[in-house]
Amino acid sequence: RDYKEPLRAQFHFSPLRGWVNDPNGLVYYKGEYHLFFQHNPYGVNWGNMHWGHAVSKDLVHWKQLDEALYPDNFGTMFSGGAVVDVDNTSGLGTAKDKPMVLFYTAAEKAWEQGLAYSLDGRTFTKLPNTILDKITDGNRDPKVIWHEPSKHWVMVLYVTEPDNLHTMHFFTSTDMKSWTFTSKIVGGRGDDRYMHECPEFFELAVDGDSKNKKWILTGADSQYAIGTFDGKTFTPEEERLFSQHGRDYYAAQTFSNEPKGRRVEIGWWRTHTNQGNNSFNQSMSVPMEIKLKKTAKGLRLVRIPVKELQVLRNKSTKIKKKNISAETANVLSGLSSETAEIQLVLKPNDSKKIQLVVRGLAINYDVAKQELEIDKVKAHAPLIDGKLDLHLFVDRTGVEVFAAKGETYMPVNYNLKAENLSYELRAEGGSATLESLEFYTLKSIW
Ligand code: FRU
């Protein structure tokens, strides 16, 4: 595509036209990653929800296709997940031709859960009847996974119970068409959004040890619980953990059937794109791999941008070990780029504050507090072995910052000024050692 809009992010997915919010039905099928998304094809504000559709061979370059799911007599098409029915348990494919199965909410009218399938990843057929009746108004966002030990499917569904109580209901099925309630998890109430909408549920090995696995349940704001799961009941061991610290990230989902066995996540990156004559609004985050790590505080999710993103790297500049302070010249003065990937490791020594200024946007690190601050968003970013590590992606609509080896993920929306392509790095109140810095200009995915 030859996009011309000044606020079109250059390597974050956005649709040609219309509003986009949650990623839906992330699944790898017949050689392609599929990204469906909440889409209003008719306007730049939320409404008329369809499932938009894009595919990619490398998780980086996306090709937008026709809408996959259109509103129908049951309602508009709200969020949900997708799987590949490898054993054809649904009977919707054949032993050879395995179906891709989408689960969505027929919203705003019926509030029932629906199923659609595809054998080619291009055309989608809905079952004539929905597969799960309404529990309460607003129940939504079915996420379905295969539970291998019990050989059945598990659906997690967000259900608002009386007095605005947020809950996640669990169901099981062997054919994807009839579902049995098994248990539920109670989250927050009202504005306490713990376990509020868009469930995501998966198992991860602790530090990659396949003999020590835990289950993770998250809601749309990425607050999560870690626990055990017997195929019917999720039992949390730690709750209300915060896994990302931007204000601008929501409804993240992970790919099922990921060919390399990774847990790869994409979330809705809320941006300020409803400006000027943009024909679209909002975008997705970069894809990242999620891992479960033992940290000083206990088990925590970490996020690492996927390796595939390296194909975007264009010109690189490496800066060797250097001491920097308020008095030294800006080590990044020679750099100029609209988009960038920056990786740096720095020892703060006796400095009080580290400041990286990206095209006019300041990324501040308070050494004493071990805290990052970007456009008033704050996040703890611990020094690891006395070092600050930052990994940044800079696009027209803001920055995504990974710190502390992925413990901190800060997606921050901020429309960078087209005329400012400069970068600066300084240490204040003392001097710091910049151990290494790599800077890459990035290619556009369009
Ligand atoms: C989250 C959400 C979902 C719902 C969708 C509708 O952003 O509210 O719960 O399915 O958006 O677009």
Image (tube, rainbow, N blue to C red):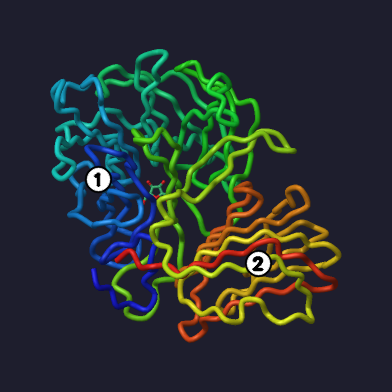
Secondary structure state at the residue bearing disc 2: loop
Residue 285 position by quadrant = bottom left
**Vertical order, 192 against 438 (above or below):** above
Name the residue type under label 2. Answer: Lys
Residue 444 position by quadrant = bottom left
Residue 137 place in picture, x, y as percent: 38, 39
Q: Answer whether residue 106 is visible to the viewer in this image.
A: yes
Residue 71 place in picture, x, y as percent: 21, 49
| Residue that protrudes farthest toward the bottom in the picture | 419
What residue lies at 63% left-to-right and 58% top-to-bottom? Answer: 390
* In this rendering, the label closer to the viewer, 2 or 1: 2
The answer to whether the residue bearing label 1 lies less than 8 angstroms from the nearest atom of ligand 1 is no
**Vertical order, 349 against 225 (above or below):** below
Residue 371 place in picture, x, y as percent: 73, 58
Q: Answer whether residue 189 is visible to the viewer in this image.
A: no
Say which quadrant the N terminus sits in: bottom left
Secondary structure state at the residue bearing disc 1: strand
Q: 439 left or right of 144?
A: right
What residue lies at 39% left-to-right and 72% top-to-bottom? Answer: 274
Q: Earlier in the sequence, mark 2 or mark 1?
A: 1
User: Mark 2 sits on what residue?
Assistant: 320
What residue lies at 54% left-to-right and 67% top-to-bottom? Answer: 439
What residue lies at 53% left-to-right and 32% top-to-bottom? Answer: 216
| Nearer-the-camera pick, 293 or 150 | 293
Residue 336 place in picture, x, y as percent: 51, 80
User: Mark 1 sits on what residue?
Assistant: 75
Circle number at residue 322: none
